[in-house]
Amino acid sequence: MLHTPVRAALFALVAAVAPTAFAALDIGDAVPKFTATAALGGKVFSYSLAEALAKGPVVVYFFPAADTADCSIEAHAFAEAIDQFAALGATVIGISADDIDTLAKFSVKSCQSRFPVASDLSKTVIQGFDAVMQTRPDFANRLSYVVTPNGRVAYYYQNLNPDKHVERMLNALRALPRATAAR
């Protein structure tokens, strides 16, 4: 058994070098407003979260890398459900650290030209939303948010498995009070 001072020193050392735990923005937190280079249907444009929120709630979802199996599955699922999001007054934006040329192709192939995807090479937006993958900091974690028109988190879901993100975002939007969902 280690003596108390040795145990305390060992605990302090482990605490100092252990990676910090994942921490998504919490419900009610203000999200960082951002403008980013995005692509929709292969066409590049400037996306503004503030402009999107002026029209209603926004689902902001982060994904690790375009053209990987799970990211393509998730993008396809969002594309297939885009009419359901629109019926709830919401829009969708996907964000990764991929370059815009890669995302322009991804916006056609996997997103089916149904919603935009934004490039965050500097990871400023990814960091602002606490979406950095802790085990691979060059990538975004698979994390989805429902952001209300007042710029606050109504719901979030983090899971590397892409299967439940769309369902959970739709359910969260359905649960929003009508005054919060509409603008």
Image (cartoon, rainbow, N blue to C red):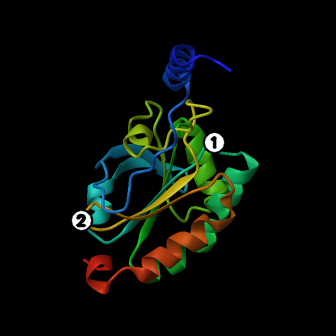
Sequence-first disc among 2 and 1: 1
Q: Is residue 13 left or right of residue 65?
A: left
Quick check: can you spot residue 88? no
The N terminus lies in which quarter of the figure?
top right
Image: 54 above or below 95:
below
- Name the residue at 51% across, 43% down: 22
Q: Is residue 73 left or right of residue 151?
A: right
From the top left corner, tell me how far across and down residue 136 is, in percent. Answer: 61, 32
Q: Around disc 1, counting alpha carbons within 10 Å, would you say few (fewer than 14), some (14 to 19), or many (20 or more)?
A: many
Image: 57 above or below 111:
below
Give the residue type at disc 1.
Ala
Q: How many marks?
A: 2
Give the residue type at disc 2.
Asn
- Name the residue at 56% across, 27% down: 18
From the top left corner, tell me how far across and down residue 77 is, in percent. Answer: 65, 67
Quick check: can you spot residue 9? yes
Closer to us: 26 or 88: 26
Q: Which numbered tag is attached to residue 150? A: 2
- Name the residue at 75% across, 50% down: 69
Closer to us: 11 or 49: 11
The C terminus lies in which quarter of the figure?
bottom left
Which residue position holds label 1? 65
Q: Is residue 176 left or right of residue 33?
A: right
- Name the residue at 43% across, 43% down: 130
Label 2 SS: loop
Circles 2, 1 touching at the beta carbon (< 8 Å): no
Closer to us: 78 or 154: 154
From the top left corner, tell me how far across and down residue 169 is, in percent. Answer: 51, 70
Label 1 SS: loop
Image: 164 above or below 16:
below
**Residue 147 placement: quadrant:** bottom left
The residues bearing labels 2 and 1 have C-alpha atoms spaced at a distance of 29 Å
